[in-house]
Every structure is written in C-alpha cells, then in structure tokens.
Amino acid sequence: MKSLKCLLLFFISMFILCCKKPTNNNTSSNSLPVIVELQNSNIQVTSSVSCTVTASITSDGGTSITAKGFCWSINHNPTVNDNKTNNGTGINSFTSHINGLHPMTTYYLRVYATNANGTAYSNEVSFITNDSIVARVPTVLTLTYAFNLISEFTTVYSRLVDSGSVDDSGYTTLCCKGVVFSTQHNPTVDMMGTPPAGVDSAAGYFYTNLFGLAPNTTYYARAYATNAVGVGYGNEISFTTPPQSITDIDGNLYATVQIGTQTWMKENLRVKKFNDGTPIRNVTDDNAWSVLTTPAWCYLNNDANNDNIYGKLYNWYAVNSSKKICPVGWRVSAKTDWLTLQNYVGSNAGKHLKANSPLWNTNTGDNTTGFTALPGGNRTQTGGWLPVGNAASFWTSTIFNSTIAYSINLGALSDSLSIISLFDDKTGMSVRCIKQ
C-alpha cells in the first residue's frame, strides 16, 4: 500500500512539471535598447573644435531601432534635445566626427538609441577640447599638366586638399593659390615674386596657365597655397615643353625639332602662298603639270586628305622663287644642311630620320631624331605618281644644273640618306624648312 502511494505521488509530480509554462529567455518587446558602456577611450579629441566618437549597441530591445547617435552638451546628462548626431538605424557599431566645438571647453556626451518603446541613453563621459587652434600651412597636390600648342602655354592641374589654419568658428582662411615653376628643382614663391594664380574648376580643384615658357625646356612645377601661417607646397612634377612651333602665311601650324645645332620643321610644308601673299598655283592635270615652268603645288595623288599627313608636293620653281615659300625666319634646306644633319646623326641616318610608322611599306625607321619623315613619294615630271609608302623625297635649294636641283631620298628598304642629282625641276616633292 505504501509503495502504491509513492508511485501515485511520482505521477502527480511529473504531471505538474509537464504542465508548467516554459520561461521565455528572449528580450521583452517592451524593452529599450541596450547600449554598451561608454569609455573615455571611445572619444578622440582631434582638434580644438572637433572630436571622433565610437559606440556599440548590443540589443534593440525586441523592436527595431529607428534612430541612434551621440548627444552632447556643456551640461550634464545631455539628451536628443541638445546637440546630436544621427547615425541611422540598427545595432551595428558606429562612429561620428563631431565638428563645431569650442576650444578649451568641457563637454558631456552620451550615446542614444530609440525604438518604439522610447529612447535609451548610455552612461555619460566628458572630454575637453584642445586649448589652442592647430595652425598649419595648406595642403595641396600637384596633379598633371597639358600643353596648348596653339596659344603656346602650359596648364597645370592641382587640388587644394586642406586650407590649413582653422578659426574658432570652423572656417578656413586662405589667401591665394596657384603654381610656382622654374628650370630648377623645388621652385618657391620667393623665386618667382608673383606666381600665376590658380582658377577654380571644381570643388577643391584648380588649374593654372603658365605663359612665357621657353620651347624644348624642362621645367619643375609645384602647386602652392598661402594662408596666415605660411605657404604650403605640393609635390613636384616636371615637364619638357614642345619644340618651338611656327605658323606659315596660311595659318598652318608646324612642330619643330632640334637636332644638333639645327632646328628643323618636323612636318612637311603645306602652304599655298608665298610670304608676300602671292598664291601658288594648284595644278592637278598631268599634262599641265608636265609643261610647267612656273611655281605650282599639288596634293599627293590629288587627294586633299593627304595634306595633313604628307603635306603638299611642290615643283622646284616654287622652291626656288625669290618670293620665299618658307615662313619668315626659315628657309628651304640646302644640300649642305642635309650633309650637316647626316654627319650629326651618323651611320644609318635614314633609319633615325624616318618615322616609325606603318605608312612605310617596309617599316625600318626608329625616329630617334624626332625628324618624323613619312613616305610621301613624289610626282614625276610627266605628272604621274610614284607609289606611296616607298620613299620620302625632299627638294633642296641647291642647284645641280640648269634643269636639275639636288634632292634627298629616304627609302623604305634603306637605312641611309641619299643625296640625289637626278630629278627634273618639274618633279613634285616635299619641302622641309630649316631655321635660319
């Protein structure tokens, strides 16, 4: 009987345990968010007017966080009704950079997080901003440059990263900015007196146009910006200005190249008039070309599209005219000029004068001189055309006999420079001018 009572008590106990309501370990949906305790190490004072703060939230209180951030004041227990940041939603860690503070001031700060049940605050910490403004020169970057060959100036592009000195209100003070340049390293404002000023182009970016640069010269340039503290300089860049460019009477622009003591056009002549404005006749008909005894020009294969590539072809009457075909200060190259060029360049002169270009049927040129000869061929004395791609032919101003002048030939299959006394004055060839 006693054992029966014990068994009955056991089953009653088990029934009570099974019917007991389980404990819910989840956060109540009626709770506020839980914020990790704030430490002094969470705050980094970065200047007399700013600081950086980090914080973490471990629980949203069972319902989504709709706002979080930092609130601060010069009084204890700041709330969202004082100064605050808004760092979004969710329980992830977050950071704020707080600006607009006052120097040498004690502030009290708390983290806040808001959900449907209200706003929770962390413990309070205090910090003191720096006792003086960190004064420094501006920070600038020198970025890149570009040449304007038409107007003959160089543009340097820069960026103002930081104006440097900051006043109590958080405003930057800047006097001027631009670019300093010199043929020596590390140019300064003092070296230039009044450097060219920069022109704003976008937020923080500016450009500066540099005029009066010598052709074919290496310059060193640095962006600069000045405030009350002093002058800040950017990194140094260097550039070499293009060789001198010249313009003919028609307005065609030509690049030039310095080879030894000589300055040559690195393009073939394209002019249609003599220097006094007298037009040179354009003759397209083969028969008319073959009987000419007066100045004339033509496009290669009578195709105007070839002009910018190969220039024009001229008979020797145009080359030899007293009216002068080259721009003022320049002249048609003579036989002796080509001999000087050949001696300076040395062996395989043709290879070093020819452009490295697929326009040559056989491309053996390396153009180490920058002369950039292209295979424009010539127009024969009968008005026909030699195949394009085989040779570059240039008139000289030097007479061989009454009907023939010396000319220059650079062949596709040869690395040499040939001086020829073969072609009749009626032949159409390219012209290279040389500086007087």
Image: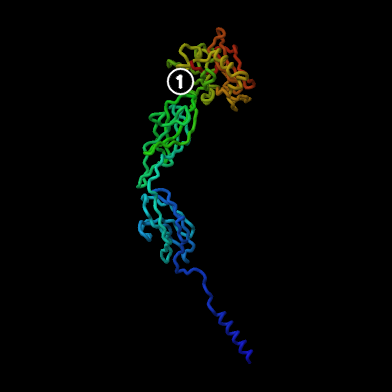
In front: 7, or 321? 7
Amino acid type, mark 1: Asp
Task: Measuring from the top left, give residue 432's x and y in whole percent.
Answer: 52, 18
In front: 261, or 399? 261
Q: How many callouts does the rendering have?
A: 1
Residue that mark 1 sits on: 248
Task: Measuring from the top left, give residue 83's x and y in whole percent.
Answer: 37, 56
Mark 1 neighbour density, 10 Å: few (under 14) some (14–19) many (20 or more): many
* Residue for point 46% across, 24% down: 214
* Residue for point 38% across, 36% down: 176
* Residue for point 55% across, 80% down: 19
Task: Measuring from the top left, give residue 414's x and y in whole percent.
Answer: 64, 20
* Residue for point 46% across, 68% down: 29
User: Which image quadrant for residue 71?
Assistant: bottom left
In front: 4, or 135? 135
Q: Is residue 232 above or below residue 22?
A: above
Left or right for 236, reference 77: right
Quarter placement of the N terminus: bottom right
Task: Measuring from the top left, give residue 300's x and y in whole percent.
Answer: 55, 22
Left or right for 190, reference 269: left
